[in-house]
Amino acid sequence: MVAMPPPYAMLAFTRFGLGPRFDLSETERAALLADPKAALKSELLPSNAILQGPDLASTKDALIAFFEAQQQKKMLKDQMAYAASPNTQMAASSNVSANDKPVASMLPDSAKPQLVRREAITTESQARFQKAFDSKTGFIERLVYFWSNHFCVSAVKGGPTAVAAGSFEREAIRPFLLGKFADMLKAVEQHPAMLSYLDNRDSLGPNSKAGQNRKKGLNENLAREIMELHTLGLKAGYTQTDVTSLARMITGWTFPGINSNKAEPAVFTFNGNAHEPGIQTLLGKSYEQPGLAQGEAALHNLAHHPATASHIAFKFARHFVADDPPQQLVQKLAKNFLASDGDLKSFTITLLDDDSAWNTAPQKMRSPQEYLLASARALNLPPNNPQPLANALASLGQPLWRPPGPNGHGDTQDVWASPEGMKVRLSYASQMAKQTQITGNPLDILNQTLGDTVSTDTKQAVARAESRQQALALMLMSPEFQLR
């Protein structure tokens, strides 16, 4: 294979990855630059997507700890309310039971729901940031970010969703990153974080036993987002009737709390008593399967629908290449998606093998997480403490696991290119340039980071900087660093 010229080679780091690491050896760098496509493809191993660590709890363990903390807090509040009641002889304010402050002060940390939630998020974010920092090119992590944003949940929801937002990405996205889309779809929709976020946990079939006994009904949130965002796309031509049908098919998809005596707590469970009985029709097709099989059959067919292929292909090309991606690339990706049975590794390789993915001029601005991690890698600033990086992401408008809605964070140039956003980026560029401990001529660092993509204007600006800190900040704010 003929090696690509250096500007193309740097796209392996910028368009598809998270920028060169400062400590990348000359041998590794030479191999990456000699054949960037092969280098990126070599990273497409399922083992590279897995995130492990002794401090990372499963969703089940994290939710059980959270539920237990909630239970202990409630018990203490009930005890304090009883002690403060007029029927006792204890002198206590009648308002104590309504005030969480004395309750919180008496609880051990393990019994404070907010601390259990905070610890889960902190531990997960630290592991995620570190893996991105250590990655050879960052391509696998970029794939994780794409799919995690496509199938997003938000910790803003609170409760189980907040506790499980990080483990959701670890359990429902990463293991399926290079497998079948249908398998990822099923894992996502049956994960407690998604069932909680989009309210399917308590969705009851109106004619089910539970629905008739509890006089509660259907919740269509998850079904709507499955069709609009996760599979077919808004322009696919489905109807409100289809949404209602799918919502009925996935009634009973839930997860129990710790007091359940019928099923394992904090894991996906099918509750037949909550499932809407009968045949359902979705997109003109009848589903006669009983129970859990009915909803799973619907997901399988949605995963293989041509509209899903087109929807996913467009979003994938838009994310990596351009806001208005080449139509032939989108068509090629959609064709591969259908022909390969939704094989995401083959789908990803199709992107890498298309010339337009490399020939299109850099025009997309790095998102805040891409920008901050690329900066940390370039200036050798390991994320030993996740909080500053998490705070920076929030300041730049992309708080970790807190998208503005079920459609995720925006993925177009206008979302991140506002004057205010650039002002905040400049502030962080200056801070990171001040914090770095690396030595050497800023021009050498510039060349190592951007290679032959750097323009004469950028080189001159860095060379004329009044200080080393200013020179490195200018590098981080340069068009070549910002755009991919």
Image (cartoon, rainbow, N blue to C red):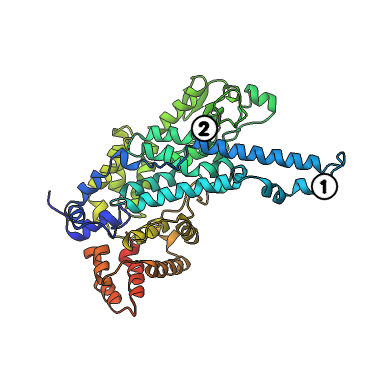
What residue is pinned by disc 1?
94
Question: Where is residue 2 drawn, in percent x and y?
Answer: 12, 51
Q: Is residue 232 visible?
A: no
Tell whether 341 sits left or right of 170: left
First in sequence, mark 2 or 1: give its number. Answer: 1
Tell whether 49 sits left or right of 41: right
Question: Where is residue 170 drawn, in percent x and y?
Answer: 42, 41
**Residue 339, image quadrant:** top left
Q: Is residue 472 above or below residue 110?
A: below
Question: Where is residue 332 drawn, in percent x and y?
Answer: 28, 42
The residue carrying pointer 2 sits among few (fewer than 14), some (14 to 19) or many (20 or more) residues within 10 Å by Cα, namely some
**Residue 272, image quadrant:** top right
- Amino acid at circle 2: Asp
Question: Which element carries disc 2, helix, strand or loop?
Answer: helix
- Amino acid at circle 1: Ser
The front one of 415 and 159 is 159
Q: Which residue is rendered at x = 62% and y = 23% of the image?
A: 208
Q: Which residue is rendered at x = 82% and y = 47% of the image?
A: 94
What residue is pinned by disc 2?
242
Name the outermost residue toward the left: 2
**Residue 75, image quadrant:** top right
The front one of 14 and 95 is 95
Q: Alpha carbon of mark 2 to alpha carbon of mark 1: how far?
A: 52 Å
